[in-house]
Amino acid sequence: MKETNDISANQKVAVTSVSASIADLTESLQYMLDLLKQEASFIHSIRQQNESVVQMIEEISAVSQQTAAASEEIASSMEEQATSANELAQYTEKLFMLTEELDKEIGEFVVKR
């Protein structure tokens, strides 16, 4: 009977040891699960921030395209104004030459009183 009691005591110690190990393992697994949940939350937050950054970059790109288009329009208008200014200068010079010619032609007439 002593032998049976010793075996029973040894089995009880083994069961207690296994139960303690399983409890430690469960606690470790729960800790790992909590860490994984925390990491998943961080990843979710980073994805949201990434989406915000992408949206901002797209908005900046759209503004840049609008600015480029406006700059092209301004450059075109400036080119047209420069062309108009050159034409105006040519017309002014021609008018000046015509005025001088008119003065010369008028000077040939003698006014009698």
Image (tube, rainbow, N blue to C red):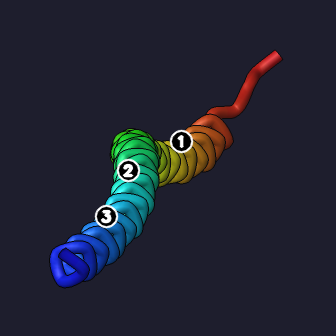
Mark found first going from the N terminus, 1 or 2 = 2
Determine the CA span between mark 1 and mark 2: 86 Å
Q: Nearer the viewer, mark 2 or mark 3?
A: 3
Identify which residue is drawn at 53% across, 51% down: 89
- Residue carrying label 1: 95
Identify which residue is drawn at 33% across, 59% down: 26
Image coords of residue 43 (percent x, y): 37, 55
> 21 and 6: which one is in front?
6
Residues at marks 2 and 3 touching, judged by CB atoms closer than 8 Å: no
User: Is 111 situated left or right of 98 in this image?
Assistant: right
Q: Name the amino acid type tagged 1.
A: Leu
Image coords of residue 84 (percent x, y): 44, 43
Image coords of residue 95 (percent x, y): 53, 42
- Residue carrying label 3: 19
How busy is the neighbourhood of tag 2: few (under 14 within 10 Å), some, or many (20 plus)? few
User: Which mark is on residue 37?
Assistant: 2
